[in-house]
Structures are given as C-alpha cells and as structure tokens.
Image: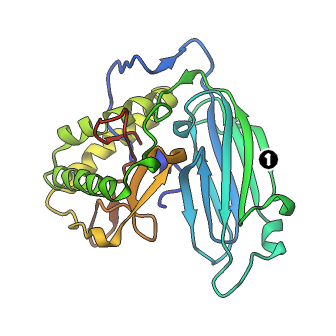
Amino acid sequence: MRNKVLMVFIMAMVFIVSNCQDSNIKKNKNMNTPIYKIKLSISIPYELYVNDFLIDRSFDEEGAVETNLFINNFILKSGIQTIVLKMYPKRGENHISDRSLDFINVKIVELLNIDSQDSKLVKEFSIDKEKIINDKYIQEVKINVPYHLQGWSTSVELINENQEKLLKELQAFYQEVYTIINNGDYDRYSKIISKRTQEALISYYDSQIIKMEQEELKDRVIAAKGKMKPINFNQYELKIYGNGKLVTLEDSKGDSPLSYSTKEYKDYFGIILYRPSNNSSLEVIR
C-alpha cells in the first residue's frame, strides 16, 4: 500500500460531483462532521482491516511502521465497527515473538474536520496475547457518524457465486477500465467510479482536500494516456472483502493491475467492485 499518511484508501478518489444526491444515501448536514483516523504502530508484517475492508498492509521487516489513515469511507453508518489486525512472523521465524506483540499499539481518534491538528481519543488498545486467533486480533469500536451510506450493505454476496465465472467477469471489467485509462478518457472513467465519488464526498463532508485529490485524479488519468502497462492476469488473484460482498484483483504485493510507470514513479488505479443486486453487473463502489 502506498501513500499511507493521507487518503491512502480513498483509493485515488475522483472528480467533483455537484449536488450529489442518492435515494439510498442519507446525510444530516445540521449535525457535527467528525473525521476518524486509525493509527497503528507495529514492527512485524501485517494487514489492517476496517469492517473487513483491507486498508493497509506492509511486509517490511526493517524497523517500526507508523500508519496514520482516515477511515470514514469504510464506515457506512453509526454503530459498532470491526477492526482486524492480521500479523505475520518475520522471515525465517516460526512464530510471532512476545516482544513484537508488546510493542503493537492501535488508536482510533476523532477530529472535528479533515485538516484538524487536534484529536480526541476514541479507543486505544494493545494486543492481548490470549485473544489472538490464528495470528489475528479483532477489536470492536463504537463510532458515530451523521450519515448513512448504503455502500455494499445490501449487495450480493459474491463469495457464494461461481468463482471461475466471477473471475472472468472481473477480468473483463478491468480490461475495459484499462482501455479507458490508456485512452486518457477521464469522462468515461469518472462515470464508472461515480458511486465511489458520491460516497466519498458524503463521508468526508465535501472536504476541500478530497476535492483537490479528485482534481488530481483527472490529471493522473490524462497523464496515463498511452502509458498503461498491459495486464497479465496470471499475475493477479481474485480477492473478496467486505464480508463476502466486495471483489478486486491484486498481485502478491496487493497492487492493482491498472498501472503505468515513468522514470520517476509508478502510478496505480485501484478499484473495488460489488454487485448491487442479483443479475446486475459488477460496479465500482470503492
């Protein structure tokens, strides 16, 4: 995962949607606009999930990792949110040492707005060794937000579908998006990710920072014209998240098949898909 400190899992969010309205999205503009972050300090390989949505991973074994991520776009509504930390032994070791576990710390903090420097601690926890199951630690935290996103909450459980057929559909979708980006066609790309756009703007209260990132995405799509790396689907695996309702393609590092390279950098276009209802096509949701 890249660009951990700011908006890493707004998933390279998108263009500005004026007056975005959706009958399935509710927002009370008269209420407070809390922003939530998760902060993780850890020195072993890990994967971090919020509501079964992979928001960060690192297999770096050199020193401690400090993760600081916004998580509103993974919170669909007020209530109990589930945090899962999957931990892995370092290379050459058979188990995770107690010393490594002792230095893991997780905090959920609340900010008044997205660029606030002040925060209020919502929950902090270390690892209770007695509650680790298969190197996985689960913690629940109650969070209140003034919106209710439908997201993938009522969508089809993809985990129950024929996985071979699902993979072929997913690959075809990625190939279509690849062509769109390789053509530098931002208008078509923005339509494909419009649901993601709407929910991002609502969950971050039309923040100017989000809008700036959305404008940057337009520049990125235009810059990718004619440069996209052809997709070798043999290198990518179907992954299901969101309690069986979300699907994506990833390589062994967790990178998207949609990428291009220059001498200075690599750029990735990540997408998460869902099926809104039975017999409907896959659509981008995150």
Residue 123 x/y as whole percent: 78, 42
Numbered disc 1: secondary structure: strand
Residue 192 x/y as whole percent: 26, 39
Residue 161 falls left or right of residue 244: left
Instruction: Identify the residue shown where x is 59% and y is 31%.
Output: 113
> Which of the pair 111/232 is nearer the observer?
232
Q: Is residue 255 above or below residue 9?
A: below
Tag 1 residue: 124
Instruction: Identify the residue shown where x is 59% and y is 21%.
Output: 146
Task: Look at the image and name its color scheme.
Answer: rainbow
Residue 284 falls left or right of residue 187: right
Q: Which residue reaches farthest bottom? A: 92
Q: Amino acid at mark 1?
A: Glu
Q: Quadrant of the C terminus?
A: top left
- Is any part of residue 204 visible from this angle? no
Residue 28 x/y as whole percent: 55, 14
Q: Which residue reaches farthest top? A: 30
Instruction: Identify the residue shown where x is 32% and y is 69%.
Output: 264
Q: How many marks?
A: 1
> Which of the pair 78/58 is nearer the observer?
78
